[in-house]
Image: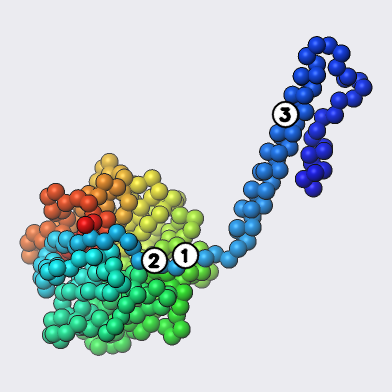
């Protein structure tokens, strides 16, 4: 087919246009050359179109999760109840962090996990139990997530491990957030809410388990092509390959109502009752509960590369390694300043951030 199109576009000199004047041969030669160039361009465009079509026909697939490589130390600020901002002495080689209202989790470069904070429900193994409940021998971890009273780890083989509370704290009712579905494999990302856990599989589909009281575990029918997930307190958020966002579950404050026309999103975060999106141009959009200004993105904020959402505050990491935070900066009951949005003076070189109620955590590159 390519040869035929090339032949059709070649201008062949006939006896009617046989060159007799000086320069005519050059003119005809240029005409032939131009025709050939057009033919080659059309062939190239056709091949590129065919290649794009072939890619579209291929089954959607995400790359297996890889452990981050930039190691550093952990910095935490905000309310220090339950010793949440007391980073374990000597902790280093950390490549990822996660935070909940009651504990903090760190993933080290060697694939092992460290957790600290309250442990009454064994989410970090401290407190009343006096021992670490991170599963003995757990290794090969590439990602972590922290729910209110449970912890989740993704291993490099695509399997998930979860520990901590599996019930509703007040009643003891089994909610199942640590009961990983049997046979679940091919997972590339994880997230954790108060009573539910979310997993993104390599084929772009989402699996949720745990409490479904607000519909947070009911994945929308036909949802596919997902590239990132986030878990709010009682709702779930998914980012699709086309840069659009889908959310479901509790929507009392509008946290699951995605702004009309929102597109070009590359990262998402979910908090207690508000949702945050980072767009490709480095700008931030937030919606949902705004009682403390957590969805009021600072004017002129740009160059953002990562986002995090706490209970009632929002955190952004800029390209230059500095951190910006806004929203609640006090406790709930007495209005005492807790400082979760007061970024430590001079903090720089940050490569990752996490947020929970009344606390912010940053990973600073060594």
Rendering quarter of residue 312: bottom left
Q: Is residue 39 left or right of residue 336?
A: right
Label 1 residue SS: loop
Q: Position of residue 248 (x, y in %)?
A: 40, 67
The answer to whether residue 124 shows anywhere in this view is yes
Q: Position of residue 246 (x, y in %)?
A: 43, 62
Label 2 residue SS: loop
The answer to whether residue 206 shows anywhere in this view is no
* 245 vs 279, nearest the viewer: 279
Bin the neighbour count of mark 3 within 10 Å (Cα to Cα): few under 14, some 14-19, many 20 and up.
some
Rendering quarter of residue 7: top right
Check the image and tell me how it is coloured: rainbow
Q: Is residue 106 left or right of residue 27?
A: left
Label 3 residue SS: helix
Q: Counting residues from the N terminus, which is met first, the one under dot 3 or under dot 2? A: 3
Rendering quarter of residue 64: bottom left
Tag 1–tag 3 contact (CB < 8 Å): no
- Residue 66 is labelled as 2
Q: Which residue was labeled with disc 3?
A: 34
Tag 2–tag 1 contact (CB < 8 Å): yes
Q: Residue furthest right?
A: 15
* 313 vs 111, nearest the viewer: 111
Residue at horizontal 61%, vertical 53%? 52
Residue at horizontal 21%, vertical 78%? 124
Residue at horizontal 64%, vertical 48%? 48
Q: Which residue was labeled with disc 1?
A: 63
- Residue 40 is labelled as none
Spatial CA span between label 1 and label 3 = 44 Å
């Amino acid at each position: 087919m390519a040869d035929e199109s090339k032949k059709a576009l070649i201008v062949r000199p006939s006896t009617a246009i046989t060159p007799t004047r000086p320069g005519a041969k050059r003119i005809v030669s240029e005409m032939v050359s131009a025709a050939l160039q057009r033919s080659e361009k059309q062939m190239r465009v056709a091949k590129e179109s065919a290649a794009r079509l072939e890619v579209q026909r291929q089954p959607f697939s995400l790359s297996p999760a890889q452990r981050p490589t930039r190691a550093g130390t952990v910095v935490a600020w905000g309310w220090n109840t339950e010793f949440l901002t007391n980073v374990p002495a000597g902790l280093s080689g950390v490549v990822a962090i996660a935070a909940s209202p009651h504990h903090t989790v760190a993933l080290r470069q060697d694939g092992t996990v460290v957790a600290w904070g309250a442990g009454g429900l064994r989410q970090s193994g401290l407190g009343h139990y006096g021992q670490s409940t991170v599963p003995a021998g757990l290794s090969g971890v590439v990602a972590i997530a922290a729910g209110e009273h449970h912890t989740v780890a993704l291993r490099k083989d695509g399997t998930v491990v979860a520990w901590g509370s599996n019930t509703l704290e007040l009643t003891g009712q089994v909610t199942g957030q640590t009961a990983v579905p049997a046979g679940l494999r091919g997972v590339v990302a994880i997230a954790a809410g108060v009573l539910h856990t979310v997993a993104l599989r390599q084929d772009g589909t989402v699996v949720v388990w745990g409490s479904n009281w607000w519909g947070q575990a009911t994945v929308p029918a036909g949802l596919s092509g997902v590239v990132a997930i986030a878990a709010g307190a009682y709702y779930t958020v998914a980012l699709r390959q086309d840069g659009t966002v889908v959310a479901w579950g509790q929507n009392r404050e509008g946290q699951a109502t995605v702004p009309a026309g929102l597109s070009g999103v590359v990262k998402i975060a979910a908090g207690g009752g508000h949702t945050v999106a980072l767009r490709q141009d480095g700008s931030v959009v937030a919606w949902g509960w705004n009682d403390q200004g957590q969805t009021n993105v600072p004017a002129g904020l740009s160059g953002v590369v990562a986002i995090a959402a706490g209970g009632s505050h929002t955190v952004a990491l800029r390209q230059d390694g500095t951190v910006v935070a806004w929203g609640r900066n006090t406790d709930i009951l007495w209005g005492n300043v807790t400082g979760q949005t007061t970024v430590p003076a001079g903090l720089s070189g940050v490569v990752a951030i996490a947020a929970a109620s009344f606390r912010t955590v940053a990973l600073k590159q060594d």
